[in-house]
Amino acid sequence: MKQVLGALGALMLAFGAQAMASPELDLNRMNVEALQAEIDTWLNKEIVAVSIEAHNHKYGNVGEKDIITLDEQWRAETKTDDKPLIAATLSSPLSVYLSRMQGQSVGLFVEIFVMDNKGLNVGQSSVTSDFWQGDEAKFQKTFDVGPDAVFIDEPEWDDTLKIWRAQVNRSVTNPSTGKLIGAATVEVNLTEWFRRQVAAN
């Protein structure tokens, strides 16, 4: 819980430093705790845990050299018409579920992806730039820290969409056992979240 609160506080501080360029945003009404709770309601589902556990088993004996090869294959596939690895991941039940969750958020969630215990993509709502996240903060500051870890990256202004965005990263545990099994990244449209908070009040 302390890690979650610390991450939320970091988000507020980081967002506060940048929100000067967007005066319509009132940090006192962001209700970031509610945002985290909303993410948890659909991330703590059996389909997420089952998919990650199966992926952990499938890639359990894969070493770093093979992981790098898979990541290079993924990166290459993003630039070609033939995409066997990307297609297999995007057509998985978890990817279908995450795409549905993104769609049902009606603009709140910009991107969602779930990783296994090595940082490999298990499911995603859209194509990511790489297959392996294990060398990035989104994995190292969540899974590598512990089951309750939450890391919220610094908010960024999207000048194309004219919105504030931030990645909420958290460790994922099996709800039945409490075992740490992977991690997840949810990119949030902060501007839309704030709009909803204002409308609710």
Image (cartoon, rainbow, N blue to C red):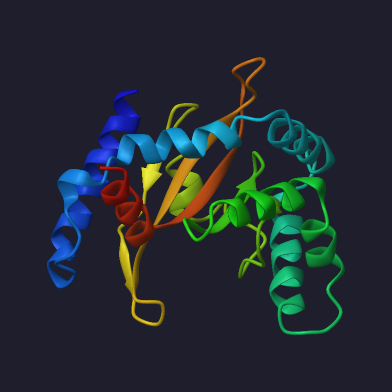
Of the pair 119 and 35, the residue shown nearer to us: 35
Viewer-nearest residue: 19 or 180: 19
Mark yes or no: residue 121 visible: no
Extreme-top residue of the structure: 177
In percent of the image, x 75 and y 37: which residue is there?
Answer: 56
Q: Quadrant of the C terminus?
A: top left
Instruction: Give the answer, above or below, for where 129 lies relative to 139.
Output: below
Horizontal relation, residue 176 to residue 22: left or right: right
Residue 44's quadrant in the figure?
A: top right
Q: Position of residue 19 (x, y in %)?
A: 18, 63
- Check the image and report above or below for 142 versus 92: above
Q: In the displayed structure, would residue 43 be above or below residue 89?
A: above
Image location of residue 79, percent across then percent down: 72, 84
Q: Position of residue 18 (x, y in %)?
A: 18, 64
Horizontal placement of 36 versus 179: left or right? left
Q: Is residue 201 visible?
A: yes
Name the residue: 60% across, 51% down.
104
Q: As rendered, which of 48 and 177 lies closer to the eye?
A: 48
Q: In front here: 192 or 151?
A: 192
